[in-house]
Image (tube, rainbow, N blue to C red):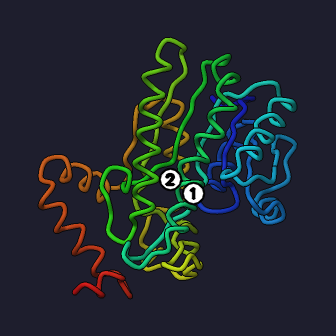
């Protein structure tokens, strides 16, 4: 189903983005990936005639425009845009430097807006797919992740609005919410001062692998799913938040209070 399809993936150096790129390549697609560090991006992926690696910071509009234009110049079309690039955070809002929240919005939200803006004309010609990798944090605000949740709520609102707007065009717009996946996002999450935490508060060995997550996502794109919430815990959180929001407040608080070195301990 992906043979000769042109797929653009932002943030392909590690985690879900890397797994998506490798999965799409193995399915016969032509894949363009971008990252802020070109050497790291190339080191993470295999050399392939159907792979284009490009250095771009999705927070920078010009970088996104150049990336999309290079892909179209090379292959003449765009069938699927996967807005995957993203960073996380872990800090009390009271203590966080606001530059951290701005950076999360610039990458997680504006990055998707920039790439979608410049890829849209090509995607319309193919009646293709625009997809965003969101999070359970886009359905339910999470403590110590104020900037991350805000960026994912914004991403989902943008994509939902765009989906309705594009109904007559045949373009399909969707987002997926992986839940807790074994990926690099927590290892590079920002602390209150904007520095990388370097350590994950979760036992990554017990989480769904990035490869399994990518396989599910690629299948959902083919089926043109409206939305996709992964993991039992993620589905339960979304369901509880809709039906019993006050109970969800307490459950979410208790869950994140139990994290190693939880910033919530400061309020205990």
Q: Is residue 15 above or below residue 72?
A: below
Residue marked by disc 2: 213
Q: Position of residue 235 (x, y in %)?
A: 28, 51
- Residue at (30% x, 75% y) in the render: 256
Q: Is residue 30 above or below residue 245?
A: above
Q: Position of residue 81 (x, y in %)?
A: 63, 36
Query: Is residue 160 found left or right of 124 in the rendered image?
Result: left
Pick the residue in front: 44 or 40. Answer: 40
Q: Helix, strand or loop at disc 2?
A: helix
Query: Is residue 96 found left or right of 249 in the rendered image?
Result: right
Q: Helix, strand or loop at disc 1?
A: loop
Q: Is residue 135 above or below residue 195?
A: above
- Residue at (78% x, 42% y) in the render: 67
Residue marked by disc 1: 86
Q: From mark 1 to mark 2, how far is it between C-alphas?
A: 16 Å
Q: Position of residue 20 (x, y in %)?
A: 62, 49
Q: Kindly indicate the quadrant of the structure image that contains residue 268.
A: bottom left
Q: Position of residue 13 (x, y in %)?
A: 70, 60
Q: Kindly indicate the quadrant of the structure image that contains residue 83.
A: top right
* Quadrant (top left/top right/bottom left/bottom right) for the N terminus: top right
């Amino acid at each position: 189903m992906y043979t000769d399809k042109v797929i653009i993936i932002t943030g392909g150096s590690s985690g879900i983005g890397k797994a998506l790129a490798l999965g799409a390549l193995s399915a016969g697609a032509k894949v363009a990936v971008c990252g802020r560090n070109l050497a790291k991006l190339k080191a993470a992926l295999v050399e392939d005639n159907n792979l284009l690696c490009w250095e771009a910071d999705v927070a920078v509009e010009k970088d996104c425009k150049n990336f999309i234009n290079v892909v179209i110049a090379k292959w003449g079309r765009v069938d699927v845009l996967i807005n995957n690039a993203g960073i996380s955070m872990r800090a009390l809002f009271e203590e966080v430097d606001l530059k951290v929240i701005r950076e999360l919005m610039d990458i997680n939200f504006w990055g998707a807006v920039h790439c979608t803006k410049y890829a849209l004309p090509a995607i319309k010609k193919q009646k293709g797919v625009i997809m965003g990798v969101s999070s359970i944090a886009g359905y339910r605000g999470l403590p110590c992740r104020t900037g991350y949740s805000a960026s994912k709520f914004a991403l989902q609102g943008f994509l939902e609005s765009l989906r309705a707007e594009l109904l007559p065009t045949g373009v399909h717009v969707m987002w997926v919410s992986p839940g807790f996946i074994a990926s690099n996002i927590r290892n590079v999450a920002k602390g209150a001062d904007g520095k990388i935490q370097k350590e994950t508060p979760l036992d990554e060995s017990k989480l769904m692998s990035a490869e399994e997550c990518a396989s599910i996502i690629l299948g959902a794109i083919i089926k043109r799913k409206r939305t996709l919430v992964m993991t039992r815990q993620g589905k339960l959180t979304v369901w509880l938040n809709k039906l019993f929001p006050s109970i969800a407040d307490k459950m979410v608080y208790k869950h994140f209070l139990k994290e190693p070195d939880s910033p919530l301990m400061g309020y205990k």
